[in-house]
Image (tube, grey):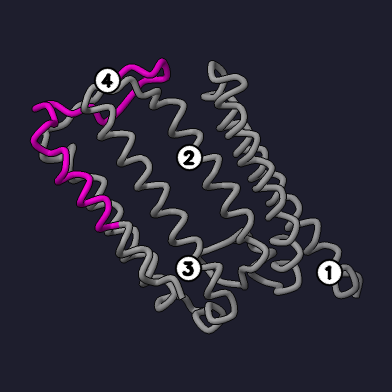
Amino acid sequence: MRKWIPPLIVIIAVAASLAVYSQLPDRVPMHWNLHGRPNGWTSRLWGAWTMPLIIAALGLVLRLLPYIDPRRENYAKFAGAYEGMVILIMLYALGVHFILLAAALGNPIAVMQWVPLGIGLLLAGLGFLLPHARSNWFFGIRTPWTLSNDTVWDRTHKFGGPVMIITGLIISLSVFVAPQWINGIMPIAIACTALLLVGYSYFAWRQETAGSLRT
């Protein structure tokens, strides 16, 4: 198992903050507008340690979720995929941490391009893992129809995995091909994907329950 990777990610985040803490300005940018200009700042202390705290909290919460899930027994059936999901989310947060530190140090970082790139890669990675997920309340395409029927769950996730990979790649490529439009492309792509997957889950449920509905 790869359970040693999440703690290592936290250690790397802490080490990065320690390495540059003395070089950070008193005011650290933490938020950018759609034009890539910082419009929100925080203190050096919070600028250095907000993301490591978030990364550590993510690791803890994601580790605890299976224990409070009513369908906790299903996690054993996709333990590797769930562990991969935890790692991907924490790696994304670590990437954001590196970007924030680099920007705070005065490097010419295009934050509004690097963050969407990370989101696109995260979606593609999650799409690769999605078909392996089994019915649960926290990870996957959770609609009334997937949660009520295991066959619908499996069909929807096998369909949704490639769709999410394509969505992630579209967002990632748009960062390079049309960076000026990425702030519009990304939410539209994500919204369309979400609607498609919800719609497909209903369609699959209708197919699977057609016989019982007629009777």
Of residue 76 and residue 138, the one placed in the foreground of this image is 76
Mark 4 or mark 2, which is nearer the start of the sequence?
Answer: 4
Q: Amino acid at mark 2?
A: Gly
- Residue at image position (54%, 20%) is 179
**What mark, if any, has residue 118 been given in the picture?**
2
Which circle marks residue 208 in the picture? 1
Looking at the rendered structure, the kind of residue marked 4 is Asn
Q: Which of labels 1 and 2 is toward the front?
A: 2
Q: Which residue is mark 3?
A: 83
Q: Earlier in the sequence, mark 1 or mark 3?
A: 3
- Mark 4 and mark 3 in contact (Cβ < 8 Å)? no
Q: Which residue is at the front of the view, 44 or 145? A: 44
Q: Amino acid at mark 3?
A: Glu
Sequence-wise, the earlier of marks 3 and 4 is 4
Q: Is residue 61 left or right of residue 172?
A: left
Quadrant of the rendered image containing residue 141: bottom right
Task: First in sequence, mark 2 or 3: give its number.
Answer: 3
Indicate the amino acid at tag 1.
Answer: Glu
Q: x and y percent of residue 62 in the render?
A: 39, 65
The picture places residue 27, in percent across and down from the top left corner, at: 13, 26
Instruction: Give the distance between the C-alpha atoms of the residues marked 1 and 4, in whole angstroms.
Output: 51 Å
The disc, 1 or 2, on the residue closer to the chain's N-terminal end is: 2
Give the side of residue 111 with respect to residue 145, left or right.
left
Q: Is residue 152 magenta?
A: no
